[in-house]
Every structure is written in structure tokens, then in C-alpha cells.
Amino acid sequence: MPSSNVANLALPIPIKTFALKLLAWYQDNKRDLPWRSNPDPYHVWVSEIMLQQTQVKTALPHFVKFLKIYPNIETLAQAKENEVLLNWSGLGYYNRARNLHRTAQIVCNQYDGNFPENYLDALQLPGIGRYTAGAILSIAYQKPLPIVDGNIQRLFIRYLKIEQETQQKNPKKIWELLDQIVKKPEISQNIGDFNQSLMEMGALICTPKNPNCTSCPLSTSCGALKQDLQTSLPLPRKRKKIRSLHYTVLIATRGGKYLLRETRSTILPTGFWEFPRILGKPSQRSSQIFKRLHRLDFKVEREVETVTHQITHRRIYFHPLIVSLKDSIPQKPFIWTTLENKHYPISSYVNKIARKLK
């Protein structure tokens, strides 16, 4: 029997029964996704990177577009980083795109363009952790490896009625349990579908709010459901405080082009181009600070409506000022360019401001 003592996690039903229930449900209810219809290692890898902190419905059109531009790992490896970042636009978390690009180059140089089948080799690649390696290798190569993400962790917290907060936060024992389960012959021979059935259960049935227990193939043996705890588990986590930041932004134009510089920041993604900015709201000192930090001397023509930009645990307020430059045309690190120039990926907040100007 299962226990809320994580030291003794165990399934309440035989492993074979557990697997058959999940696999049967999965075959009847799985979503039709392109990386499932063609579980090529390249397709599975790209999809898993895109799905990190991104929902399927958001990632799906980007996946289709990305694969049209980079149909195989060789085309991705040969691309320039700024082009990859541009074609990643809309997905956010741009380090994922950088890691994807670096990994493509490593795989082409060290593995002849074939994503490594060895688990330890996969873990050495940029952006590949325990979950992502397990997902790629189990789905693409049928390697009997466990996976635990937030959805699967929530599924097992409810199914095994894990009630202690400290144990809910640490999925180590769930990893250990699944590591034992996936090695069983009845599961290892169909590991790709088994792992994807857990993914689908967490995404479609055992959802964070209002789980659909009436459609769950495991409902008759679910520890939380038996005690009407399915909406109480996992225990709610304390939300991290959202910090607010304010930036004053200069908008200078010349012949339909904007004055931009490359992002140098620990807050915003690097490798993109943006308007010159300084920390803080517009003030009487703004012009002095811009002149000292950016060597820009200007006259403010008018202010534009503030633009809000949300990133992880931060809410950023950009206060745009349309200006005319007083001195000679700035040189490096500044450029004059249109926002449609594909050689210069544009920070997403810049496009938000540009829409306000129209």
C-alpha cells in the first residue's frame, strides 16, 4: 500500500496494471502533435526545449515554423546565433535558443549529427538536464529512463497522497520510484509511450486546478481522491514577490530608422538590440545621465505612454521619450536600423513601444 512516508513510496496496484491503464488511456486520448507522429531525435529534442516553461498550445506553431527554417540539425548548426534568436522570437527564455544552437554544433562536430543515445553524454550538452535527457532518449531511442517534471510530480503527489510539504518540494523519491518502474519489462519495451502518458495525464487530467478525476484511468486507486484531497494537494507554494523596475528609454529616428544598441544586461536577454535606456523614471537628471553613460545629447520632443513588460519575477516599466539628437550622429555601439532588419534581432519590448508610436 502507498504511504505518505516518502521513504517507502510504492504503487497501490501492480506495476503491470498501472502501466496498462495509463497506456490504454494514452492511446485513446493523446494529442496529435508533430513530434509524436515523427519521433525523430531532432524533432523530440527541439520540442522538449521549446516546452520548457512553455505550454504546448504556445509552442506548437513555433515548432512548425522553426522546423521549416531548420529542417534538420545540420541547418540549425550552420545558422548564425542572431538568426536563431530572431526565429525563436515569441517563445521567450532566449537562453534555450542559445543552448539549442550550441548543442546542434556540438552534436554535428562530435557525434556526426546524431543526437547521442548515451544518457551521460546527453547530460553534457548545453540546456540538457535530467528530465530533458530522459524524455528525449526514452521517446526517440526507447531508453528505459524515468522523467519527472512539475506535471508528473503533481500526479504522483496526489496518487500516492504525499502530504508533507517538505516531501512535496523534493521529488527525489518520485524519481527513485519511477526509476524502478521503468526498468520492468512490461514498461521498458514501451517506454516512450509510457513516459508520454504521464506527461499527458499531468497536462490534461491531473491539472493544477480542477483535476478531471472522473476521466482519470487511475481514479479507483488514487490516494488523494479517496479522501477528497485532490484539490488540496499539492499544498500551495508561496509565490515569489514580483519586483518592479523602471527604465527611461530614448526614441531617436532618422529616415525611418531607429537608433539602437545591443543589450548589455543581466535583466533582459542579451544578443538583442534595443533603444538606449537608463534605470529609473524620467527626471531632470535623465539628460545628464544619458550624456554620461551613452554620450547622447538630445532634446525631448514628447513622452510616450508607458509600456509594461513582464519577465520572470519582474515587472518592467519602460518610459519612452521621443527625442531629437543635438550633436553628431552616434557611432558604435549604436546603429541606425529598421525594426524589420533580420540581421538585428529586436528585444520584444522595443516592438511594444513601436506599436505605441503608430
Image (cartoon, rainbow, N blue to C red):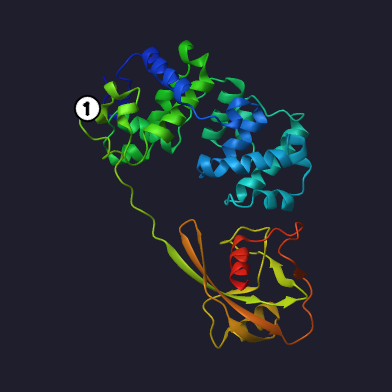
Q: Is residue 175 left or right of residue 285?
A: left
Q: Is residue 347 left or right of residue 166?
A: right
In the displayed structure, 350 sits above or below 173; it is below
299 or 182: which is nearer to us? Answer: 299
Task: For mark 1, give the secondary structure.
Answer: helix
Neighbor class of circle 1 (other Cα within 10 Å; few <14, some 14-19, many 20+) is few
- Which quarter of the figure has residue 141? top right
Q: Residue at x 75, y 32 (%)?
A: 110
228 or 247: which is nearer to us? Answer: 228
- Which quarter of the figure has residue 343? bottom right
Q: Visible in this render: residue 309?
A: yes
- Which quarter of the figure has residue 3? top left
Q: Visible in this render: residue 4?
A: no
Q: Residue at x 52, y 41 (%)?
A: 57
Across and down, in percent, residue 51 comes to 54, 40
Kind of residue indicated by mark 1 = Lys
Q: Residue at x 70, y 84 (%)?
A: 324
In the displayed structure, 317 sits above or below 82; it is below
- From the image, tell me which residue sits under label 1: 226
Across and down, in percent, residue 332 comes to 78, 71
In the displayed structure, 171 sits above or below 15; it is below
**On-image quarter of the C terminus:** bottom right
**On-image quarter of the N terminus:** top left
